[in-house]
């Protein structure tokens, strides 16, 4: 595989795609149709120093972000964060339609969004869950992108950066809403995922894995299911109201309650059986979840 092209700035991106010079070095909006490279040019692997939000339409091919492929054949939005590898396969630039918004992190400095943007799970997914939009949702997205474009084309003044960041914030909030809708409309797929998660934890808890490897981490569970930890937590939050960590902890507590009520093992022995390095950690988690200590819970059965 050819080494990824390192795109160090938005100006560099414009040179790479043979676009005209950006009006603002920290933000850019352009259509794929504005790209003037040879029509036979294929997109390859790139790494950027900025965020990319793109709406792609009517183009087949494959797009790999992190370790997994996006479902790229339908009209979708995709999101990438700085220092992440985007790998395109068999995608002719001349066939791609849609818009691209590139945002350098420096544009957001001094605004709350600078710290909040990484909390949007869609920037860090290593799964194939791209964002599919209805016609109405696509219009909402394009209206905001058009507002950003218009603001960039207007004469800069004291309000320009505030308005740009506000529109970016609004766009990401809408996309977060649409992702939540997508989780719900893909309920059957997600229910299958829940079943796989249950089976994974059942096996882990019933075998000696807790003793051998300790409490399963969110990263381990997500990796076993073939997705990122952020995606799994977002899906679980929509389906169950719990993050992955909370889900694992609640399964541990259920197992602890079973051992406390049906065996004569000491609390320390149970803590070890459940993968805790220190009994105090087990005691704190149990009391936090159940509002009573492990011994008080056991005494309620005597």
Image: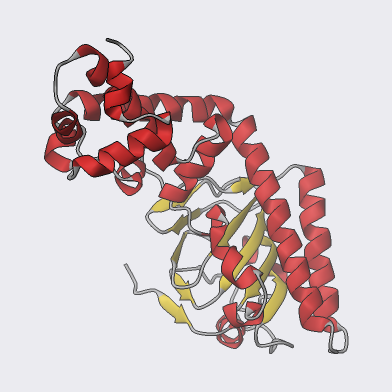
Q: Is residue 117 above or below residue 272?
A: below
Please state which of residues 135 and 175 is positioned toward the viewer in this rendering.
175
On the image, the x and y values in percent for residue 275 come to: 19, 38
Q: Quadrant of residue 292?
A: top left
Locate the C terminus and report the quarter of the image it occupies: top left
Give the colour scheme of this rendering.
Answer: secondary structure
The residue lying furthest to the top in this view is: 302
Establish if 37 lies above or below 241: below
Q: Is residue 139 above or below residue 244?
A: below
Q: Position of residue 265 (x, y in %)?
A: 14, 22
User: Which residue is pictured at 34% across the width and 39% down the height?
Assistant: 285
The image quadrant where one finds the N terminus is bottom left
Q: Position of residue 4 (x, y in %)?
A: 39, 74
Query: Up-down: is 233 above or below 121?
Result: above
Left or right side of 217 for 122? right
Number of disc labels: 0
Q: Position of residue 228 (x, y in %)?
A: 41, 49
Which of these two is toward me, 148 or 206?
206
* Residue 164 visible in rendering: yes
């Amino acid at each position: 595989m050819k080494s990824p092209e390192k795109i160090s700035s938005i100006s560099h991106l414009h040179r790479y795609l043979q676009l005209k010079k950006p009006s603002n070095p920290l933000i850019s909006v352009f259509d794929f149709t504005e790209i003037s490279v040879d029509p036979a040019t294929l997109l390859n692997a790139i790494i950027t120093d900025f965020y990319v939000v793109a709406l792609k339409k009517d183009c087949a091919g494959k797009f790999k972000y992190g370790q997994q492929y996006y479902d790229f054949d339908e009209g979708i939005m995709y999101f990438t964060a700085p220092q992440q590898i985007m790998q395109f396969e068999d995608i002719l630039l001349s066939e791609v339609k849609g818009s691209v918004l590139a945002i350098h992190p420096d544009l957001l400095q001094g605004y709350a969004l600078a710290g909040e943007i990484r909390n949007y799970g869609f920037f860090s997914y290593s799964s194939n869950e791209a964002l599919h939009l209805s016609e109405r949702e696509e219009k909402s997205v394009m209206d905001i992108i058009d507002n950003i474009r218009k603001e960039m084309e207007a004469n800069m003044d004291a309000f320009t950066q505030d308005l740009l960041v506000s529109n970016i914030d609004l766009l990401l909030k809408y996309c977060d809403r649409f992702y939540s809708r997508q989780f719900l409309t893909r309920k059957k797929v997600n229910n299958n995922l829940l079943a796989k998660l249950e089976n994974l934890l059942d096996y882990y808890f019933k075998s000696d894995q807790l003793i051998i490897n300790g409490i399963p981490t969110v990263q381990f569970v997500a990796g076993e299911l073939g997705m990122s930890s952020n995606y799994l937590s977002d899906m679980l939050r929509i389906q169950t109201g719990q993050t992955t960590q909370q889900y694992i902890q609640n399964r541990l507590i259920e197992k602890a309650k079973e051992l406390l009520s049906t065996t004569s093992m000491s609390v320390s022995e149970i803590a070890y059986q459940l993968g805790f390095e220190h009994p105090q950690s087990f005691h704190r988690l149990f009391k936090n979840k159940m509002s009573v200590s492990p011994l008080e819970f056991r005494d309620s059965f005597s």
